[in-house]
Image (cartoon, rainbow, N blue to C red):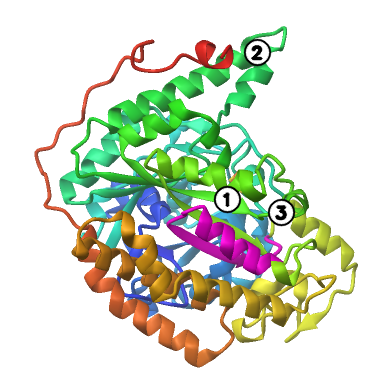
Protein backbone atom coordinates (compact mmCIF):
# COMPACT_ATOMS: atom_id res chain seq x y z
CA UNK A 1 0.00 0.00 0.00
CA UNK A 2 1.54 3.31 -1.09
CA UNK A 3 0.42 6.45 0.69
CA UNK A 4 0.15 9.49 -1.58
CA UNK A 5 -0.23 12.98 -0.13
CA UNK A 6 -1.32 15.52 -2.72
CA UNK A 7 -1.44 19.30 -2.66
CA UNK A 8 -3.71 20.13 -5.65
CA UNK A 9 -3.11 23.09 -7.93
CA UNK A 10 -4.33 24.07 -11.39
CA UNK A 11 -1.11 25.93 -12.12
CA UNK A 12 2.38 24.40 -11.85
CA UNK A 13 5.46 26.60 -11.83
CA UNK A 14 8.21 23.96 -11.59
CA UNK A 15 9.63 25.89 -8.64
CA UNK A 16 7.60 27.18 -5.69
CA UNK A 17 8.10 29.96 -3.20
CA UNK A 18 7.02 28.26 0.05
CA UNK A 19 6.71 24.59 0.98
CA UNK A 20 3.15 23.37 1.61
CA UNK A 21 3.92 22.43 5.20
CA UNK A 22 0.96 20.11 5.70
CA UNK A 23 2.44 17.58 3.24
CA UNK A 24 5.55 17.17 5.37
CA UNK A 25 3.62 17.16 8.67
CA UNK A 26 1.30 14.36 7.52
CA UNK A 27 4.35 12.53 6.20
CA UNK A 28 5.71 12.82 9.76
CA UNK A 29 2.42 11.45 11.10
CA UNK A 30 2.53 8.46 8.72
CA UNK A 31 3.64 5.37 10.69
CA UNK A 32 6.86 3.81 9.38
CA UNK A 33 5.06 0.51 8.84
CA UNK A 34 3.33 2.07 5.79
CA UNK A 35 6.65 3.10 4.21
CA UNK A 36 7.68 6.60 3.15
CA UNK A 37 4.70 8.46 1.67
CA UNK A 38 4.90 9.85 -1.87
CA UNK A 39 4.49 13.62 -1.69
CA UNK A 40 3.00 15.45 -4.66
CA UNK A 41 2.90 19.23 -4.74
CA UNK A 42 1.07 20.29 -7.86
CA UNK A 43 2.38 23.85 -7.60
CA UNK A 44 5.59 22.16 -8.85
CA UNK A 45 4.14 19.66 -11.31
CA UNK A 46 0.84 17.92 -12.01
CA UNK A 47 0.00 14.59 -10.39
CA UNK A 48 0.05 11.52 -12.63
CA UNK A 49 -2.94 9.36 -11.60
CA UNK A 50 -1.57 6.38 -13.58
CA UNK A 51 0.87 5.62 -10.76
CA UNK A 52 -1.98 4.84 -8.33
CA UNK A 53 -2.62 1.14 -7.68
CA UNK A 54 -5.58 -0.68 -6.15
CA UNK A 55 -5.44 -0.43 -2.34
CA UNK A 56 -3.22 2.69 -2.22
CA UNK A 57 -4.24 5.61 -0.02
CA UNK A 58 -4.54 9.03 -1.64
CA UNK A 59 -4.71 11.87 0.88
CA UNK A 60 -5.73 15.24 -0.58
CA UNK A 61 -5.59 18.51 1.36
CA UNK A 62 -7.91 21.25 0.12
CA UNK A 63 -8.71 24.86 0.79
CA UNK A 64 -11.43 26.71 -1.07
CA UNK A 65 -9.23 27.83 -3.97
CA UNK A 66 -8.00 24.37 -4.96
CA UNK A 67 -11.13 22.38 -4.16
CA UNK A 68 -12.23 21.70 -7.74
CA UNK A 69 -8.82 20.35 -8.74
CA UNK A 70 -8.74 18.30 -5.52
CA UNK A 71 -12.10 16.72 -6.36
CA UNK A 72 -10.90 15.86 -9.88
CA UNK A 73 -7.86 14.07 -8.43
CA UNK A 74 -10.02 12.30 -5.83
CA UNK A 75 -12.35 10.91 -8.51
CA UNK A 76 -9.45 9.74 -10.68
CA UNK A 77 -7.77 8.02 -7.72
CA UNK A 78 -11.01 6.31 -6.67
CA UNK A 79 -11.56 5.02 -10.19
CA UNK A 80 -8.13 3.40 -9.97
CA UNK A 81 -9.12 1.59 -6.77
CA UNK A 82 -7.45 3.79 -4.15
CA UNK A 83 -8.82 4.76 -0.74
CA UNK A 84 -9.41 8.48 -1.06
CA UNK A 85 -9.14 10.69 2.03
CA UNK A 86 -9.75 14.43 2.11
CA UNK A 87 -8.58 16.89 4.75
CA UNK A 88 -7.81 20.60 5.11
CA UNK A 89 -9.96 23.63 5.88
CA UNK A 90 -12.44 23.16 3.06
CA UNK A 91 -13.03 19.47 3.73
CA UNK A 92 -13.50 20.32 7.43
CA UNK A 93 -16.18 22.85 6.54
CA UNK A 94 -17.89 20.74 3.85
CA UNK A 95 -17.23 17.05 4.57
CA UNK A 96 -20.40 15.92 2.76
CA UNK A 97 -19.31 17.72 -0.39
CA UNK A 98 -15.95 15.91 -0.50
CA UNK A 99 -17.77 12.60 0.03
CA UNK A 100 -20.32 13.38 -2.69
CA UNK A 101 -18.25 15.15 -5.33
CA UNK A 102 -14.60 14.34 -4.63
CA UNK A 103 -14.72 10.56 -4.65
CA UNK A 104 -13.79 10.53 -0.95
CA UNK A 105 -14.13 7.39 1.15
CA UNK A 106 -13.18 9.42 4.22
CA UNK A 107 -12.87 12.99 5.40
CA UNK A 108 -10.66 14.17 8.25
CA UNK A 109 -12.19 17.18 10.00
CA UNK A 110 -9.78 19.45 11.87
CA UNK A 111 -6.09 18.77 12.55
CA UNK A 112 -4.71 15.59 10.99
CA UNK A 113 -1.63 15.28 13.26
CA UNK A 114 -3.03 12.74 15.71
CA UNK A 115 -5.83 11.01 13.81
CA UNK A 116 -3.91 10.23 10.58
CA UNK A 117 -2.36 6.92 11.76
CA UNK A 118 -5.88 5.58 12.58
CA UNK A 119 -7.13 6.60 9.13
CA UNK A 120 -4.28 4.70 7.48
CA UNK A 121 -4.77 1.64 9.69
CA UNK A 122 -8.50 1.54 8.83
CA UNK A 123 -7.73 1.85 5.10
CA UNK A 124 -5.15 -0.91 5.37
CA UNK A 125 -7.73 -3.15 7.05
CA UNK A 126 -10.32 -2.26 4.43
CA UNK A 127 -12.65 -0.55 6.89
CA UNK A 128 -12.26 3.20 6.37
CA UNK A 129 -14.85 5.32 8.17
CA UNK A 130 -16.47 8.18 6.31
CA UNK A 131 -15.65 10.78 9.00
CA UNK A 132 -12.69 11.24 11.33
CA UNK A 133 -12.68 14.04 13.89
CA UNK A 134 -9.15 15.40 14.22
CA UNK A 135 -10.26 18.37 16.37
CA UNK A 136 -7.76 20.99 17.52
CA UNK A 137 -4.74 19.19 18.87
CA UNK A 138 -2.65 20.75 21.63
CA UNK A 139 0.67 22.30 20.64
CA UNK A 140 2.59 19.53 22.41
CA UNK A 141 0.97 17.06 19.96
CA UNK A 142 1.83 18.98 16.76
CA UNK A 143 3.77 16.56 14.60
CA UNK A 144 7.15 17.80 13.35
CA UNK A 145 7.51 17.89 9.58
CA UNK A 146 9.61 15.26 7.77
CA UNK A 147 12.05 17.57 6.07
CA UNK A 148 14.21 14.65 4.99
CA UNK A 149 11.63 14.20 2.19
CA UNK A 150 11.88 17.71 0.77
CA UNK A 151 13.25 18.13 -2.78
CA UNK A 152 15.98 20.60 -1.95
CA UNK A 153 16.11 22.29 -5.35
CA UNK A 154 12.43 23.11 -5.83
CA UNK A 155 11.51 25.57 -3.03
CA UNK A 156 12.79 29.02 -2.12
CA UNK A 157 11.46 29.10 1.45
CA UNK A 158 10.72 26.30 3.90
CA UNK A 159 7.91 26.74 6.42
CA UNK A 160 7.78 26.03 10.13
CA UNK A 161 4.77 26.63 12.36
CA UNK A 162 5.22 28.10 15.83
CA UNK A 163 1.59 28.82 16.83
CA UNK A 164 -1.91 27.88 15.63
CA UNK A 165 -5.00 29.98 16.31
CA UNK A 166 -5.67 33.73 16.44
CA UNK A 167 -7.46 35.67 19.21
CA UNK A 168 -8.92 38.22 16.76
CA UNK A 169 -12.21 37.84 14.89
CA UNK A 170 -11.92 39.50 11.48
CA UNK A 171 -15.10 39.03 9.49
CA UNK A 172 -13.41 37.92 6.24
CA UNK A 173 -11.11 35.36 7.88
CA UNK A 174 -11.84 31.76 8.81
CA UNK A 175 -8.67 31.13 10.86
CA UNK A 176 -10.12 32.09 14.24
CA UNK A 177 -13.14 29.87 13.64
CA UNK A 178 -11.29 26.82 12.32
CA UNK A 179 -8.02 27.00 14.30
CA UNK A 180 -9.69 28.65 17.30
CA UNK A 181 -8.99 31.86 19.19
CA UNK A 182 -6.78 30.29 21.85
CA UNK A 183 -3.16 30.40 20.68
CA UNK A 184 -1.64 26.91 20.69
CA UNK A 185 2.03 27.65 20.86
CA UNK A 186 4.79 25.11 20.26
CA UNK A 187 7.78 24.89 22.57
CA UNK A 188 10.89 26.63 21.31
CA UNK A 189 12.71 23.26 21.41
CA UNK A 190 10.34 21.77 18.82
CA UNK A 191 10.53 24.82 16.55
CA UNK A 192 14.32 25.18 16.75
CA UNK A 193 14.80 21.48 16.07
CA UNK A 194 12.95 21.78 12.74
CA UNK A 195 14.70 24.98 11.73
CA UNK A 196 18.11 23.50 12.43
CA UNK A 197 17.19 20.46 10.34
CA UNK A 198 16.27 22.77 7.46
CA UNK A 199 19.46 24.82 7.75
CA UNK A 200 21.48 21.61 7.68
CA UNK A 201 19.85 20.91 4.30
CA UNK A 202 20.71 24.37 2.96
CA UNK A 203 17.51 26.33 3.63
CA UNK A 204 18.31 29.68 5.15
CA UNK A 205 15.00 31.42 4.42
CA UNK A 206 12.21 30.19 6.68
CA UNK A 207 8.59 31.29 6.75
CA UNK A 208 7.13 31.05 10.24
CA UNK A 209 3.78 29.86 8.92
CA UNK A 210 1.64 31.06 11.80
CA UNK A 211 -1.86 32.39 11.96
CA UNK A 212 -0.59 35.26 14.08
CA UNK A 213 2.99 35.42 15.40
CA UNK A 214 1.96 38.14 17.89
CA UNK A 215 -0.89 36.45 19.77
CA UNK A 216 -0.71 38.60 22.93
CA UNK A 217 -0.79 42.37 22.58
CA UNK A 218 0.11 44.95 25.21
CA UNK A 219 -3.54 45.91 25.28
CA UNK A 220 -4.54 42.31 26.04
CA UNK A 221 -2.15 42.35 28.99
CA UNK A 222 -3.42 45.65 30.26
CA UNK A 223 -7.04 44.49 30.15
CA UNK A 224 -6.18 41.22 31.88
CA UNK A 225 -4.22 43.05 34.58
CA UNK A 226 -7.39 44.92 35.58
CA UNK A 227 -9.27 41.69 36.31
CA UNK A 228 -9.59 40.56 39.92
CA UNK A 229 -8.73 37.00 38.93
CA UNK A 230 -5.15 37.07 37.66
CA UNK A 231 -5.19 33.65 36.02
CA UNK A 232 -5.79 35.05 32.51
CA UNK A 233 -2.97 37.54 32.95
CA UNK A 234 -0.62 34.71 33.93
CA UNK A 235 -1.58 32.67 30.86
CA UNK A 236 -0.96 35.64 28.57
CA UNK A 237 2.33 36.45 30.28
CA UNK A 238 3.51 32.88 29.81
CA UNK A 239 2.71 33.02 26.09
CA UNK A 240 4.62 36.28 25.76
CA UNK A 241 7.64 34.94 27.67
CA UNK A 242 7.73 31.92 25.34
CA UNK A 243 7.65 34.20 22.27
CA UNK A 244 10.69 36.09 23.54
CA UNK A 245 12.45 32.85 24.41
CA UNK A 246 11.92 31.57 20.86
CA UNK A 247 13.22 34.81 19.36
CA UNK A 248 16.31 34.71 21.58
CA UNK A 249 17.05 31.23 20.29
CA UNK A 250 16.45 32.22 16.66
CA UNK A 251 19.03 34.95 17.19
CA UNK A 252 21.62 32.28 17.99
CA UNK A 253 21.19 30.45 14.69
CA UNK A 254 23.68 30.98 11.85
CA UNK A 255 23.77 34.67 10.89
CA UNK A 256 22.75 34.06 7.28
CA UNK A 257 19.28 32.89 8.32
CA UNK A 258 16.24 35.05 7.55
CA UNK A 259 12.69 34.60 8.81
CA UNK A 260 9.32 35.87 7.64
CA UNK A 261 6.05 35.75 9.55
CA UNK A 262 2.49 37.07 9.85
CA UNK A 263 1.49 39.51 12.57
CA UNK A 264 -1.12 42.10 13.38
CA UNK A 265 -0.35 45.79 13.17
CA UNK A 266 -0.57 46.12 16.96
CA UNK A 267 2.97 44.70 17.16
CA UNK A 268 4.16 48.15 16.06
CA UNK A 269 3.09 49.50 19.48
CA UNK A 270 5.46 47.10 21.15
CA UNK A 271 9.07 48.24 20.60
CA UNK A 272 10.47 45.44 22.79
CA UNK A 273 8.81 42.86 20.58
CA UNK A 274 10.01 44.56 17.40
CA UNK A 275 13.57 44.72 18.73
CA UNK A 276 13.42 41.02 19.59
CA UNK A 277 12.23 40.37 16.04
CA UNK A 278 15.15 42.37 14.69
CA UNK A 279 17.64 40.38 16.80
CA UNK A 280 15.99 37.14 15.68
CA UNK A 281 16.35 38.21 12.03
CA UNK A 282 12.61 38.09 11.43
CA UNK A 283 13.05 40.51 8.58
CA UNK A 284 9.64 40.39 7.00
CA UNK A 285 6.03 40.19 8.10
CA UNK A 286 2.69 39.91 6.38
CA UNK A 287 0.51 42.57 7.99
CA UNK A 288 -3.20 42.67 7.24
CA UNK A 289 -3.81 46.37 6.63
CA UNK A 290 -7.09 45.61 4.79
CA UNK A 291 -8.31 49.18 4.41
CA UNK A 292 -6.86 52.67 4.65
CA UNK A 293 -10.12 54.22 5.85
CA UNK A 294 -11.86 53.92 9.27
CA UNK A 295 -15.12 52.98 7.50
CA UNK A 296 -13.40 50.15 5.64
CA UNK A 297 -11.89 48.80 8.86
CA UNK A 298 -15.32 48.81 10.46
CA UNK A 299 -16.66 46.88 7.46
CA UNK A 300 -14.30 43.98 8.28
CA UNK A 301 -14.46 44.16 12.13
CA UNK A 302 -10.84 45.23 12.22
CA UNK A 303 -11.11 48.55 14.01
CA UNK A 304 -8.03 47.67 16.09
CA UNK A 305 -6.11 48.77 12.98
CA UNK A 306 -5.33 52.39 12.24
CA UNK A 307 -6.22 54.45 9.18
CA UNK A 308 -4.86 57.51 7.37
CA UNK A 309 -1.63 59.18 8.58
CA UNK A 310 -1.49 57.12 11.78
CA UNK A 311 -1.50 54.03 9.58
CA UNK A 312 1.45 55.32 7.56
CA UNK A 313 3.35 56.05 10.77
CA UNK A 314 2.50 52.62 12.21
CA UNK A 315 3.72 50.81 9.12
CA UNK A 316 6.90 52.87 9.01
CA UNK A 317 7.58 51.78 12.61
CA UNK A 318 8.09 48.21 11.40
CA UNK A 319 10.62 49.39 8.89
CA UNK A 320 12.51 51.42 11.52
CA UNK A 321 12.91 48.21 13.49
CA UNK A 322 14.23 46.31 10.48
CA UNK A 323 10.99 44.48 9.66
CA UNK A 324 9.91 44.70 6.02
CA UNK A 325 6.16 44.67 5.58
CA UNK A 326 4.13 42.73 3.04
CA UNK A 327 0.92 44.72 3.34
CA UNK A 328 -2.35 43.04 2.51
CA UNK A 329 -5.21 45.24 1.27
CA UNK A 330 -8.83 44.42 0.41
CA UNK A 331 -10.81 46.19 -2.32
CA UNK A 332 -14.56 46.12 -2.86
CA UNK A 333 -15.63 46.91 0.71
CA UNK A 334 -19.05 48.60 0.86
CA UNK A 335 -17.46 51.89 1.93
CA UNK A 336 -14.87 51.86 -0.91
CA UNK A 337 -15.18 54.52 -3.59
CA UNK A 338 -13.21 55.02 -6.86
CA UNK A 339 -10.77 57.29 -5.01
CA UNK A 340 -10.06 54.53 -2.43
CA UNK A 341 -7.83 52.76 -4.96
CA UNK A 342 -5.49 55.70 -5.52
CA UNK A 343 -5.54 56.54 -1.80
CA UNK A 344 -4.51 52.96 -1.00
CA UNK A 345 -1.72 52.97 -3.57
CA UNK A 346 -0.47 56.28 -2.10
CA UNK A 347 -0.49 54.91 1.46
CA UNK A 348 1.37 51.78 0.36
CA UNK A 349 3.99 54.03 -1.23
CA UNK A 350 4.36 56.48 1.64
CA UNK A 351 4.37 53.80 4.31
CA UNK A 352 7.45 52.30 2.64
CA UNK A 353 6.08 48.80 2.61
CA UNK A 354 8.30 46.44 0.68
CA UNK A 355 5.68 44.13 -0.85
CA UNK A 356 1.92 44.40 -1.14
CA UNK A 357 -1.02 42.30 -2.19
CA UNK A 358 -4.37 43.71 -3.25
CA UNK A 359 -7.25 41.28 -3.07
CA UNK A 360 -10.91 41.68 -3.95
CA UNK A 361 -13.39 41.11 -1.16
CA UNK A 362 -14.54 37.53 -1.51
CA UNK A 363 -16.76 35.64 0.91
CA UNK A 364 -14.71 32.67 2.12
CA UNK A 365 -16.53 29.72 3.66
CA UNK A 366 -16.24 29.55 7.42
CA UNK A 367 -16.22 33.33 7.79
CA UNK A 368 -18.77 35.71 9.27
CA UNK A 369 -18.94 37.47 5.89
CA UNK A 370 -19.78 34.27 4.08
CA UNK A 371 -22.62 33.35 6.43
CA UNK A 372 -24.07 36.83 6.16
CA UNK A 373 -23.80 36.78 2.37
CA UNK A 374 -25.30 33.30 2.05
CA UNK A 375 -28.26 34.36 4.18
CA UNK A 376 -28.97 37.41 2.01
CA UNK A 377 -29.31 35.17 -1.07
CA UNK A 378 -32.08 33.06 0.48
CA UNK A 379 -33.06 29.58 -0.66
CA UNK A 380 -32.79 30.22 -4.38
CA UNK A 381 -29.41 31.80 -5.08
CA UNK A 382 -28.33 32.55 -8.65
CA UNK A 383 -27.02 29.51 -10.57
CA UNK A 384 -24.00 29.51 -12.88
CA UNK A 385 -23.40 26.39 -15.02
CA UNK A 386 -25.93 24.64 -12.79
CA UNK A 387 -24.06 25.53 -9.58
CA UNK A 388 -25.42 27.84 -6.87
CA UNK A 389 -23.27 30.93 -6.55
CA UNK A 390 -22.94 30.15 -2.84
CA UNK A 391 -20.82 27.16 -3.90
CA UNK A 392 -18.67 29.26 -6.21
CA UNK A 393 -15.60 26.99 -5.87
CA UNK A 394 -17.55 24.36 -7.85
CA UNK A 395 -18.20 26.73 -10.76
CA UNK A 396 -15.71 26.26 -13.64
CA UNK A 397 -12.97 28.89 -13.06
CA UNK A 398 -13.55 30.70 -16.37
CA UNK A 399 -17.20 31.32 -15.46
CA UNK A 400 -16.71 32.44 -11.86
CA UNK A 401 -17.72 36.02 -11.10
CA UNK A 402 -14.95 38.25 -9.77
CA UNK A 403 -17.17 39.99 -7.25
CA UNK A 404 -19.95 38.46 -5.22
CA UNK A 405 -21.54 41.39 -3.45
CA UNK A 406 -23.33 44.10 -5.37
CA UNK A 407 -21.38 47.22 -4.53
CA UNK A 408 -23.30 50.45 -3.76
CA UNK A 409 -21.44 52.56 -6.37
CA UNK A 410 -19.13 50.38 -8.51
CA UNK A 411 -19.65 47.39 -10.78
CA UNK A 412 -17.67 44.19 -10.20
CA UNK A 413 -15.74 44.82 -13.42
CA UNK A 414 -14.81 48.33 -12.31
CA UNK A 415 -13.48 47.01 -8.99
CA UNK A 416 -11.52 44.29 -10.77
CA UNK A 417 -10.05 46.75 -13.26
CA UNK A 418 -9.07 49.25 -10.59
CA UNK A 419 -7.55 46.50 -8.43
CA UNK A 420 -5.48 45.30 -11.37
CA UNK A 421 -4.31 48.88 -11.97
CA UNK A 422 -3.07 49.18 -8.37
CA UNK A 423 -1.08 45.93 -8.77
CA UNK A 424 0.32 47.26 -12.05
CA UNK A 425 1.42 50.54 -10.55
CA UNK A 426 2.84 49.09 -7.30
CA UNK A 427 4.87 46.52 -9.24
CA UNK A 428 5.91 48.68 -12.19
CA UNK A 429 9.67 48.42 -12.87
CA UNK A 430 10.06 52.06 -11.85
CA UNK A 431 8.33 51.61 -8.48
CA UNK A 432 10.18 48.41 -7.67
CA UNK A 433 13.52 50.03 -8.51
CA UNK A 434 12.67 52.95 -6.21
CA UNK A 435 11.69 50.58 -3.39
CA UNK A 436 14.91 48.62 -3.82
CA UNK A 437 17.06 51.57 -2.70
CA UNK A 438 17.41 50.13 0.82
CA UNK A 439 19.67 47.47 -0.73
CA UNK A 440 23.28 48.54 -1.20
CA UNK A 441 24.62 46.22 -3.90
CA UNK A 442 23.48 46.32 -7.52
CA UNK A 443 23.23 42.54 -7.52
CA UNK A 444 20.96 42.69 -4.47
CA UNK A 445 18.77 45.33 -6.08
CA UNK A 446 18.41 43.26 -9.24
CA UNK A 447 17.50 40.22 -7.16
CA UNK A 448 14.88 42.27 -5.32
CA UNK A 449 13.40 43.37 -8.65
CA UNK A 450 13.18 39.82 -9.88
CA UNK A 451 11.54 38.61 -6.68
CA UNK A 452 9.02 41.47 -6.76
CA UNK A 453 8.05 40.61 -10.33
CA UNK A 454 7.72 36.93 -9.62
CA UNK A 455 5.51 37.68 -6.63
CA UNK A 456 3.29 39.80 -8.79
CA UNK A 457 3.10 37.23 -11.62
CA UNK A 458 2.21 34.42 -9.24
CA UNK A 459 -0.29 36.23 -7.09
CA UNK A 460 -1.84 39.03 -9.14
CA UNK A 461 -2.54 37.84 -12.64
CA UNK A 462 -3.29 34.25 -11.75
CA UNK A 463 -5.91 35.56 -9.30
CA UNK A 464 -7.73 38.48 -10.83
CA UNK A 465 -7.00 38.68 -14.55
CA UNK A 466 -9.85 37.70 -16.85
CA UNK A 467 -7.85 37.68 -20.04
CA UNK A 468 -6.66 34.11 -20.72
CA UNK A 469 -3.64 35.30 -22.77
CA UNK A 470 -2.51 37.40 -19.80
CA UNK A 471 -3.02 34.46 -17.44
CA UNK A 472 -0.98 32.12 -19.62
CA UNK A 473 1.78 34.70 -20.08
CA UNK A 474 1.94 35.29 -16.33
CA UNK A 475 2.23 31.60 -15.54
CA UNK A 476 4.92 31.19 -18.21
CA UNK A 477 7.00 34.14 -17.10
CA UNK A 478 6.66 33.20 -13.41
CA UNK A 479 7.94 29.75 -14.29
CA UNK A 480 10.82 31.28 -16.21
CA UNK A 481 11.75 33.69 -13.40
CA UNK A 482 11.29 31.19 -10.57
CA UNK A 483 14.24 28.96 -11.42
CA UNK A 484 17.06 31.55 -11.22
CA UNK A 485 15.23 33.16 -8.29
CA UNK A 486 15.45 30.00 -6.22
CA UNK A 487 19.24 30.04 -6.46
CA UNK A 488 19.26 33.41 -4.74
CA UNK A 489 17.68 31.81 -1.69
CA UNK A 490 19.80 28.68 -1.51
CA UNK A 491 22.67 28.33 0.96
CA UNK A 492 25.48 25.86 1.40
CA UNK A 493 24.23 22.95 3.55
CA UNK A 494 25.51 22.80 7.14
CA UNK A 495 25.16 19.08 7.91
CA UNK A 496 26.89 19.37 11.30
CA UNK A 497 24.91 22.29 12.68
CA UNK A 498 23.71 21.82 16.27
CA UNK A 499 20.65 23.37 17.85
CA UNK A 500 21.40 26.30 20.16
CA UNK A 501 20.61 25.54 23.80
CA UNK A 502 17.63 26.88 25.72
CA UNK A 503 17.97 30.51 26.75
CA UNK A 504 16.69 31.39 30.20
CA UNK A 505 14.57 34.49 29.93
CA UNK A 506 15.53 36.97 32.60
CA UNK A 507 14.82 40.59 33.27
CA UNK A 508 18.08 41.43 31.54
CA UNK A 509 17.29 39.58 28.30
CA UNK A 510 13.58 40.24 28.04
CA UNK A 511 11.40 43.11 29.16
CA UNK A 512 9.06 41.65 31.78
CA UNK A 513 5.39 41.89 31.17
CA UNK A 514 4.90 43.64 34.48
CA UNK A 515 7.38 46.35 33.59
CA UNK A 516 5.74 46.75 30.20
CA UNK A 517 2.16 46.97 31.35
CA UNK A 518 2.85 49.26 34.25
CA UNK A 519 4.73 51.49 31.83
S1 LIG B 1 -7.11 38.14 9.52
FE1 LIG B 1 -5.30 37.79 10.80
S2 LIG B 1 -5.77 38.94 12.70
FE2 LIG B 1 -7.74 38.63 11.62
S3 LIG B 1 -8.58 36.73 12.49
FE3 LIG B 1 -7.47 36.18 10.60
S4 LIG B 1 -5.43 35.61 11.33
FE4 LIG B 1 -6.40 36.76 12.98
123 sits left or right of 146 in the view: right
Would you say residue 342 sits in the magenta stretch?
yes
Question: Between tags 1 and 3, which lies in front?
Answer: 3
Indicate which disc, 1 or 3, sits on the residue closer to the N terminus.
Answer: 1
Residue placed at 52% from the left, 56% from the top? 350
Rounded to the nearest whole Å, what is the CA distance between mark 1 and mark 3? 14 Å
Q: Horizontally, is 391 left or right of 430 in the view?
A: right
> Percent x, y for residue 281?
31, 39
Q: Nearer the viewer, residue 404 or 447?
A: 447
Image quadrant where residue 509 sits:
top left
Q: Is mark 1 within 8 Å of ligand 1?
A: yes
Mark 2: give few (<14), some (14-19) or many (20+) Cα within 10 Å: some
Name the residue beneath numbered marker 2: 225
Q: CA distance from mark 3 to mark 2?
A: 31 Å
305 on left or right of 39: right
Q: Quadrant of ligand 1?
A: top right
* Badge 1 density bin: few <14, some 14–19, many ≥20, Cα 10 Å: many
Name the residue furthest bottom. 469
Q: Which mark is residue 293?
A: 3
Q: Is 268 placed above or below 299 here? A: above
Instruction: Name the residue furthest top.
Output: 228
Residue 329 in magenta stretch = no
Instruction: Give the magenta-colored segment's residue range.
Output: 340-364
Q: Nearer the viewer, residue 251 or 234?
A: 251
- The span from disc 1 to disc 2 (Cα, nearest Å) is 27 Å
399 lies above or below 498: below
Circle 2 — which element? helix
Q: Position of residue 398 (x, y in %)?
A: 61, 86
If the image is split into quadrants, where does the C terminus sit? top right
Residue 421 visible, this orientation: yes
Q: Which residue is mark 1?
A: 288
First reached walking from the N terminus: tag 3 or tag 2: 2
Amino acid sequence: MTVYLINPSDVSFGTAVITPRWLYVLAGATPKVFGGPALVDETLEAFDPNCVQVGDVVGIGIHTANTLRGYAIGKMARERGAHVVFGGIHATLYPEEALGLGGAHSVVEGDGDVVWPSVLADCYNGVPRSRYLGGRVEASDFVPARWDLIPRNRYMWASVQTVRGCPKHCSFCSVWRTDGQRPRQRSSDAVIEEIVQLRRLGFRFIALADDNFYPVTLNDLQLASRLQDKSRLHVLEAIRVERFELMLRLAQLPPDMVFFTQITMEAAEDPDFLEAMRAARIKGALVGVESVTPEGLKDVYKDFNLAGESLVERLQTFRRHGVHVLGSFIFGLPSDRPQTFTATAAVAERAEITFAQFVMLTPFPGTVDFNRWEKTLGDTPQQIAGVAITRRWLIPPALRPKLYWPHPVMSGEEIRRRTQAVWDSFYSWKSIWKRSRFIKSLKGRLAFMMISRIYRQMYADTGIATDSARLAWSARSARWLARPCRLLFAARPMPHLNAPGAVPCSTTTMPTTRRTISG
